[in-house]
Image (cartoon, grey):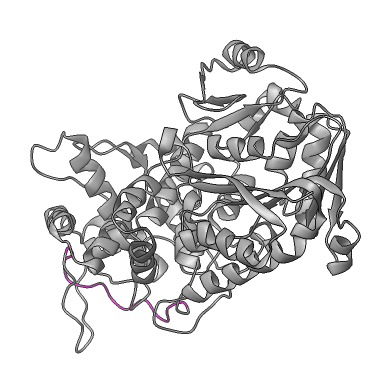
């Protein structure tokens, strides 16, 4: 809901000779020698809260490229070393340098509080030797290790709720991941496998498999939180708000998200886009269920390099998000405000529905998002969008009673989109949930003034928690008699393969 230098792999095969060295953790052989001072505790892990969670995901900037240590991958092209490729029983072939590089990235995300998408984006920018297969393997491994961070840590004897690992400890997380994949492949002959790498030599795959199997038998809250790999507080809050639905939603939120795109109807139809992708990219996408212009890709691919994307024929947008934009009901010639526009995903969809006629004002408090929105608007060939930065309450005051329709896609926990942002569940804290609920109420009270009499107000979140959704709307309506509820939509995570969203459509009295 901080850069560091690269650290190379280190062998765990030698027992510690330190006096009073602790005994080996479950799932490992005797402990490795001390590796020096550890990073500061990550937020919410029983120590100092560092770093502070940023409101803006896109504001994570890096000042310099990290240095490689001598023990890190140092080949001219380390990602093409055939001797590092393994294919043990049931284990997906994986380049050892790619694995080490992925663990460094996971360290930046989980131990330093960086955002996963920015870490991966930066890796691709600087590691130009990685080919398409390596990039895909790297990104998917990073996301899997972040998604199952608590589960895999438990499998090798770590309780991340109480103590924080160092980067070199993360080879254990990789061991747990490979063991689980080995078991799931069904080709283990009852014996989970690990590749013959020195960094993994201290881990016993059978003990790891036993630890993972034990999780499936537990029913208490802590075991369930570990099994579904979420913080204790997050699991307990979900049970409180969603009851018996929560375990099912968690399972869906831990699945890999599909790639869904929306045809830009200002430039093409869905059918024309589908045909072009088939011809130019050898893709045969299916129509995304319950969307007007969505397509879902059958295979994961970097489609941002496609000519159709560069020419503005489509945008990547989840199917539920597309439906939320359609709920606004914007018509050609109307005056519409997207008051929490971000980088403009829904703004672009609404503009297409308006057929480039009328006025669409896109507002946000972050200047970098406004800049990105303008770039996307230009690529999409949209002439009706005016992007404005919210500098103070005066920005909203000047727009009172001016809009036929207002969309409030408010800041939220992001609990409905954890498939795409698995690191968010480790950064979001209980106090953050209280904070965003306060912000949501303030935005509803203040920004609803922009709706003119008889106009439409749409409140939306990418959360599945009632306290941010239904309950927030009920409280708003109880203190604001000007609006009445017309329609509510709950988009459960996994429904039609989409993310979790909520939307409420309200009408202002004439």
When the figure is inspected, residue 439 is found, relative to residue 84, above or below; the finding is below
When the figure is inspected, residue 240 is found, relative to residue 248, above or below; the finding is below
User: Image check: 260 left or right of 280?
Assistant: left
Q: Residue at x 21, y 81 (%)?
A: 17
Which residue is at the front of the view, 463 or 2?
A: 463
When the figure is inspected, residue 488 is found, relative to residue 445, above or below; the finding is above
Which residue is at the front of the view, 379 or 73?
A: 379
User: Image check: 150 left or right of 428?
Assistant: left
Q: Which quadrant of the view contains residue 386?
A: top right
Q: Is residue 69 visible?
A: no
Percent of width and height locating residue 57: 63, 59
**Residue at the limit of the structure toward the bottom, as seen here:** 19
Q: Which quadrant of the view contains residue 345?
A: top right
- Residue 37 in magenta stretch: yes
Q: Is residue 127 visible?
A: yes
Q: Residue at x 52, y 20 (%)?
A: 285
Q: Residue at x 86, y 58 (%)?
A: 400
Where does the magenta region start and end? 27-39
Percent of width and height locating residue 236: 33, 68
Which residue is at the front of the view, 271 or 210?
A: 271
Percent of width and height locating residue 59: 69, 61
- Magenta span: predominant SS is loop
User: Image check: 208 left or right of 97?
Assistant: left
Percent of width and height locating residue 323: 59, 35
User: Image check: 160 left or right of 215?
Assistant: right
């Amino acid at each position: 809901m901080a850069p560091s230098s690269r650290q190379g792999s280190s062998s765990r095969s030698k027992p510690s000779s330190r006096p009073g060295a602790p005994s080996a953790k479950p799932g490992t052989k005797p402990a490795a020698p001390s590796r020096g001072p550890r990073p500061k505790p990550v937020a919410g892990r029983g120590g100092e809260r560092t770093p502070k969670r940023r409101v803006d995901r896109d504001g994570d900037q890096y000042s310099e490229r990290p240095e490689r240590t001598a023990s890190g991958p140092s080949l001219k092209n380390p990602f093409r070393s055939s001797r590092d490729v393994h294919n043990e029983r049931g284990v997906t072939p994986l380049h050892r340098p790619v694995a080490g590089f992925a663990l460094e990235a996971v360290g930046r995300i989980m131990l330093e509080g960086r955002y996963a998408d920015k870490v991966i984006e930066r890796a691709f920018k600087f590691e130009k030797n990685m080919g398409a297969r390596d990039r895909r393997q790297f990104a998917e491994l990073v996301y899997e290790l972040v998604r199952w961070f608590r589960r895999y840590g438990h499998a090798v004897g770590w309780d991340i709720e109480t103590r924080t690992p160092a980067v070199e400890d993360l080879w254990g997380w990789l061991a747990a991941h490979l063991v689980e994949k080995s078991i799931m492949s069904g080709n283990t002959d009852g014996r989970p496998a690990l590749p013959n790498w020195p960094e993994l030599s201290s881990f016993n795959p059978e003990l790891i498999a036993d630890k993972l199997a034990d999780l499936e038998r537990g029913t208490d809250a802590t075991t369930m939180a570990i099994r579904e790999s979420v913080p204790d507080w997050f699991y307990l809050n979900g049970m409180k708000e969603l009851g018996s639905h929560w375990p099912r939603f968690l399972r869906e939120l831990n699945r890999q998200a599909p790639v869904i795109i929306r045809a830009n109807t200002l430039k093409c139809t869905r059918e024309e886009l589908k045909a072009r992708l088939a011809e130019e990219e050898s893709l045969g996408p299916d129509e995304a269920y319950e969307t007007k212009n969505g397509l879902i890709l059958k295979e994961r691919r970097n489609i941002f390099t496609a000519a159709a994307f560069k020419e503005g024929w489509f945008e990547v947008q989840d199917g539920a998000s597309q439906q939320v934009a359609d709920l606004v009901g914007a018509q050609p010639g109307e005056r519409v405000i997207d008051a929490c526009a971000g980088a403009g995903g829904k703004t672009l969809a609404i503009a297409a529905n308006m057929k480039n006629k009328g006025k669409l004002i896109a507002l946000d408090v972050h200047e970098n998002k406004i800049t990105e929105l303008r770039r996307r608007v230009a690529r999409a060939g949209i002439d009706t969008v005016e992007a404005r930065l919210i500098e103070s309450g005066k920005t909203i005051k000047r727009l009172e009673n001016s809009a036929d329709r207002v969309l409030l896609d408010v800041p939220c926990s992001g609990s409905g989109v954890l498939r795409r942002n698995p690191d968010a569940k480790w950064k979001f804290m209980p106090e953050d949930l209280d904070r965003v609920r306060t912000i949501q109420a303030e935005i509803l009270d203040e920004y609803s003034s922009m709706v003119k009499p008889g106009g439409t107000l749409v409140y939306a979140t990418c959360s599945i928690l009632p306290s941010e959704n239904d309950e927030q709307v009920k409280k708003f309506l109880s203190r604001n008699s000007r609006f009445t509820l017309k329609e509510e939509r709950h988009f459960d995570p996994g429904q039609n393969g989409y993310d979790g969203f909520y939307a409420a459509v309200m009408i202002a009295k004439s």
